[in-house]
Image (tube, helix red, strand yellow):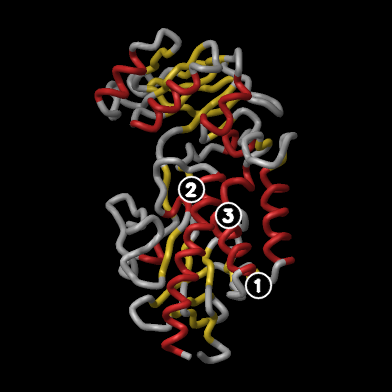
Amino acid sequence: MTEQTKKLVVIGSGPAGLTAAIYGSRADLSPVVYTGTAYGGQLMVTSEVENFPGFPDPVLGPDLMDRMRTQAQRLGATLIQEDVTGVDFKAYPFEIRTATDAVKAYSVIVATGANPKRLDLDSERRLMGKGVSNCAVCDGFFFRGKKVAVVGGGDTAMEEATFLTKFATSVVVIHRRSELRASAALQHEARSNPKIGFIWDTIVTGVLGDGRVQGVRLKGLKSGVETDLAVDGLFVAIGYEPNTRIFEGQLELDRAGYINVRNETETNVPGVFVAGDAHDHRYRQAITAAADGCKALLDAEKFLNKKLAVVS
């Protein structure tokens, strides 16, 4: 093993990547973490987090990520705030490239996450975390006794709408088409819920409110007419896009771009592991991503124990 070759490189700095770094440091693997220029993952645009264990009082998403980063650095992880621009997983040791450098590694954990698709509205960005959300499980509790809207027509939108009825007095689903794309079972569940209503052939053109969501501006695609709808929250549920483009041709991806896994964290390339939303399109929670980071590190450690015994 040469001095230039790292034992472990982690790509990503959300809960999955930083948990892997924390465990990797304690395992004496001297992890190098490429955090990316958009450091911290989705929690960086999350206001209050109430469901992460160990915090009896709400913690701001950026504060939670800052604590994870500080913990990883204190234990010895090296954090580099650069984007990985390319990888070579076909040769061993693996190569990880940025705009300024390239390093070799005996094992890699991919924790690049996924980004929710957005409406691309300035008002949506301005009110993100202030009534605009992409996660009903994360934020639904804050809308107890309030009126909310859900944008979308697929499985995720129906799941979000149904979940929100536990808290909200009413949920209106806004869909740009005249029929849903969700599975028949999820459609039936949503349509049968008396709290859920539907607005068809309509898009959201603006989010209304000064400091907090107070409504949405709608445009009928057939009529062209714009109207305002008073709601206390807007949940955008039009899908996610995994941050895996740089791994095309290097790792096995599914049709949606998520990394395929074997045995929890293993990719099709021995020595390359994945954690968090880059492969998990089902749970998408900070706590499950952190758990994934732990599992990926434990699997990487077992791999390295065998591999480095041969390489050394």
Q: CA distance from mark 2 to mark 1?
A: 25 Å
Give the amino acid type for the residue marked by disc 3 in the picture. Gly
Task: Classify mark 2: helix, strand or loop.
Answer: strand
269 is higher (above) or lower (below) than 66 = below
Q: Is residue 253 left or right of residue 38?
A: left
Disc on res. 115: 2
Q: Position of residue 277 (x, y in %)?
A: 46, 50
Disc on res. 78: 1
223 is higher (above) or lower (below) than 12 = above
Q: Residue at x 53, y 67 (%)?
A: 10
87 is higher (above) or lower (below) than 134 = below
**Label 3 close to label 2 by CB (< 8 Å):** no
In the current view of this chain or complex, which residue is farthest to the left? Answer: 184
Give the amino acid type for the residue marked by disc 2 in the picture. Asn
Reading the chain from its start, which is encountered first: label 1 or label 3?
A: 3
Give the amino acid type for the residue marked by disc 1 in the picture. Thr
Task: Classify mark 1: helix, strand or loop.
Answer: strand
Disc on res. 14: 3
Q: CA distance from mark 1 to mark 3?
A: 15 Å
